[in-house]
Each structure stands twice: as structure tokens, then as C-alpha cells.
Image (cartoon, rainbow, N blue to C red):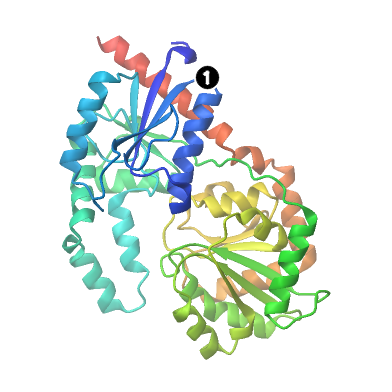
């Protein structure tokens, strides 16, 4: 089948990029599919339609959450008047041809959310009482139903780790899973004066002069606990005390900074933590930073780390981050086991504090062409290949 004859509908909860990475991802995916000649419509649950390629099932709804049964009913009505070649859904709905949850497996997300709590009793209760969250339970059951009863749907995993989660939780055979590593729209290089100004402001916030020989690490996330910030502060404090040069941690995101500030104060490094709040464009902060860090408890494939690699920055993250598929530890950056691997994190930070090590990592990122590997262009080319395979099987079975 020719690519130009494909007509794809992508179903997502929201498409407002201000809400987070998942929303930015589906918009970029839709735009790149159209750019590569695939007629693609982005269908959201709620929100205001935006142009000819974005539509909403409930454009006038003010409901915070719409039950999945209503979503499925509205979806079927929509498809009667707007037929498509394939339904690519980020939600576990009946009738999906491709299921690609941007947050990874719902089952694994529940387990890792619980694991991110330091208290073992609370971890146990979070795992046992997760059903008290009605929406989460609804989506867990729907994902289980979709993947265990519909033998035609293909699970498109954003990373190898997500593939293992689909196999572990739903016993999916290999032919039902396609690993298509996540991709991003490559960021544009910010103006040098803007980058220099951002770095000066970060140094000034720490009480350092503009010429200070400091190493700036950038952390960006909206859920500080899940993304490992609270566990990261202790090993970061260890590195601050051992490093021959000042170390700063710039923390960007919408989460409340109070707990992280308190942990920094208790560790005696409150001046080394700089909170920026949400940043409209991370490219300036990444360009001003020396390395990106995300000691996450769960991430199917972090956009932040992919953006850092695309800008040639060395990174430190955990093996629990699907973006680690792109990273060779000791060549492109540092991979640690999990956010409580205190010694590994401290050692990794001290390696990144060395300018020669950072330069070698950055050079390897460029040599290995990671920019193209993490691009949305590559991601979409692989998706188009999957679409054609599915349609070929469909036509053969008719």
C-alpha cells in the first residue's frame, strides 16, 4: 500500500503542549506524519479543535474526566462519518489497531509510582490500594481487556523496557509488540546571548560570579517524587562536598519545591539548588547547562533526556528510563540502577564534574549521530512501516 493512500486517526486524551510531554508528543507525531505524506487526524477527548487536523470528541465538555465507556461510544460514532485506514490510540479503547500509551504500561506505571515512596509501608499500601483511584483502575482494566482479548491490536512500545512490561503483565507474543523508540522534534539552537544570560542568572542565584568555574546540572520534570528528585539530593550533596569545583542543580518544573528545598537545607546544600519553576522552552536551559540529569523511577522514554542528547549534552539517568536504550553508559553519559543507587549517582556526578569527561561524552553523542536516532523523523518512518505491515495482514485475511 502506498503511503499517500493511508489515512490515520490518532486518539489522545489532550493535545495542549502546555500540559506536558505526552501532549507535545502526539502533536509532533501528527504533524510529522502529515509532513511525510500520511493523511493524519489527531482526535482528542476534550479541548478546542485546532485547524483541520485536530478534532475533539467532547469539545464543549467541562468534565474533568469522561468515563471510558462514553469515550468509546463517541469514538465509534465519529469513525462512522470519518473513516480511517487505521486507528492509532494512546488510550486502551476497543477497536484500536495500534496501542501506543505515551506513559507506558498502566500496570507498570502503578507499580513504579508506588516504588517511588521511600517508606516501605506506604509502598505496600500504594500497591495494594491502587484500586481506590477510580480512573486508574478503569484504565488498568481496559488495558488488560484490550491486550488479552483482542488478538489483532499491536502494542507499539516506546522502548525495550516497555516491551518487557507488556510481556510480563499480559504475556503478549513477540508478533503483537513493535518496539518503536520514542522520538522528538529536534530543538532549535537558542541565541548565544540568551544562553549566556540564563547561565549568569543561575550562577547569581547561587551567589557565584559570572566567571565562576561551576558545573551546572539541569533537572526537568513536573513530578519531583516520581522522577527521583527527592532521592537525588543526598548523593548530589555527597558530590558537592567531594567536587573540587562548585556544583549547581537547576530544577525546572511545575511541582511544589518545598520538600526539595527542605531536603537541600537538611543536607547543607540549599544554595546549590536553583528552582526555576516551569520553563516554556527547555532548549535555552539545556544549552546553558553542562549536563542533564533525570534519576527517574519510571519513564517509558523521557523527552527531556532525548532533548539533551539531541543538543549534544551528556546525561545521567536510570535504567528505569526507556531513553536509556539510546545511551551507552560511560560513552554518552552515566546510567545508574535506580534513584536510590546513592554511590553510583555520586560517582557519576563526579565524573560529569570533570570537563574532559563531559567533552568526551558530548563528542561521542555527536559521533554516534544520536541526534538523528532520537528524532521524530526516524520515529515516524518506523511507524509508517508498522502501519503498512498491519494493513497488509488485514488485507490478506479478508
Instruction: Tell me: residue 136, above or below residue 124.
Output: above
Q: Quadrant of the C terminus?
A: top left
Q: Quadrant of the N terminus?
A: top left
Instruction: Tell me: residue 64, above or below residue 32.
Output: below
Q: Secondary structure at mark 1?
A: loop
Residue 5 seen from this side: yes
Instruction: Tell me: residue 266, above or below residue 115.
Output: below
Q: Tell me if 177 is positioned left or right of 327 in this view.
A: left
Q: Residue furthest front?
A: 60
Label total for image: 1
Q: Nearer the viewer, residue 234 or 30?
A: 30
| Quarter location, residue 134 | bottom left
Residue at the spot x=65%, y=53% of the render? 283
* Spot occupied by residue 91 in the image (x, y as percentages of width and height): 30, 41
Residue 20 seen from this side: no
* Spot occupied by residue 50 in the image (x, y as percentages of width and height): 43, 35
Q: Tell me if 17 is positioned left or right of 115 in this view.
A: right
| Residue holding disc 1 | 37
Q: Residue furthest right?
A: 211
* Spot occupied by residue 347 in the image (x, y as percentages of width and height): 63, 73
Give the crowd class for mark 1: few <14, some 14-19, many >=20 residues within 10 Å: few
Q: Nearer the viewer, residue 398 or 58?
A: 58
Q: Nearer the viewer, residue 213 or 320?
A: 213
* Spot occupied by residue 41 in the image (x, y as percentages of width and height): 40, 27
Residue at the spot x=26%, y=40% of the render? 92
| Quarter location, residue 216 | bottom right
Instruction: Tell me: residue 16, above or below residue 304.
Output: above
Amino acid at each position: 500500500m502506498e503511503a499517500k493512500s493511508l489515512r490515520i486517526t490518532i486518539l489522545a486524551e489532550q493535545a495542549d503542549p502546555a500540559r506536558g510531554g505526552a501532549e507535545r508528543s502526539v502533536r509532533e507525531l501528527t504533524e510529522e506524519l502529515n509532513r511525510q505524506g500520511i493523511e493524519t487526524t489527531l482526535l482528542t477527548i476534550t479541548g478546542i479543535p485546532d485547524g483541520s487536523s485536530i478534532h475533539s470528541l467532547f469539545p464543549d465538555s467541562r468534565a474533568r474526566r469522561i468515563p471510558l465507556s462514553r469515550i468509546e461510544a463517541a469514538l465509534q460514532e465519529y469513525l462512522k462519518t470519518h473513516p480511517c485506514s487505521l486507528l492509532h490510540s494512546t488510550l486502551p479503547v476497543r477497536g484500536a489497531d495500534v496501542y501506543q500509551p505515551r506513559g507506558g504500561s498502566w500496570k507498570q506505571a502503578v507499580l513504579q509510582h508506588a516504588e517511588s515512596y521511600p517508606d516501605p509501608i506506604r509502598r505496600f499500601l500504594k500497591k495494594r490500594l491502587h484500586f481506590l483511584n477510580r480512573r486508574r483502575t478503569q484504565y488498568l482494566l481496559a488495558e488488560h481487556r484490550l491486550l488479552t482479548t483482542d488478538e489483532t491490536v499491536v502494542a507499539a512500545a516506546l522502548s525495550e523496557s516497555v516491551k518487557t512490561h507488556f510481556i510480563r503483565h499480559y504475556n503478549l507474543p513477540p508478533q503483537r509488540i513493535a518496539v518503536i523508540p520514542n522520538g522528538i522534534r529536534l530543538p532549535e539552537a537558542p541565541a548565544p546571548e540568551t544562553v549566556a544570560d540564563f547561565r549568569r542568572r543561575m550562577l547569581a542565584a547561587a551567589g557565584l560570579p559570572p566567571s565562576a568555574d561551576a558545573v551546572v546540572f539541569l533537572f526537568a520534570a513536573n513530578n519531583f517524587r516520581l522522577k527521583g528528585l527527592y532521592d537525588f539530593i543526598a548523593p548530589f550533596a555527597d558530590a558537592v562536598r567531594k567536587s573540587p569545583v562548585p556544583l549547581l542543580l537547576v530544577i525546572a518544573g511545575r511541582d511544589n519545591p518545598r520538600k526539595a528545598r527542605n531536603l537541600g537545607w537538611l543536607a547543607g546544600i540549599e544554595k546549590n539548588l536553583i528552582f526555576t519553576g516551569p520553563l516554556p522552552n527547555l532548549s535555552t536551559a539545556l544549552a546553558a547547562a553542562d549536563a542533564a540529569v533525570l534519576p527517574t523511577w519510571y519513564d517509558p522514554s523521557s523527552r527531556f533526556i532525548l532533548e539533551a542528547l539531541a543538543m549534544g549534552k551528556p546525561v545521567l539517568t536510570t535504567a528505569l528510563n526507556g531513553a536509556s536504550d539510546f545511551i551507552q553508559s560511560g560513552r554518552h553519559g552515566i546510567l545508574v540502577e535506580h534513584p536510590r543507587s546513592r554511590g553510583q549517582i555520586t560517582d557519576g556526578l563526579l565524573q560529569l564534574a570533570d570537563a574532559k569527561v563531559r567533552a568526551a561524552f558530548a563528542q561521542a553523542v555527536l559521533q554516534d549521530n544520536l541526534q538523528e536516532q532520537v528524532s521524530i523523523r526516524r520515529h515516524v518512518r518506523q511507524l509508517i512501516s508498522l502501519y503498512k505491515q498491519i494493513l497488509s495482514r488485514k488485507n490478506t485475511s479478508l
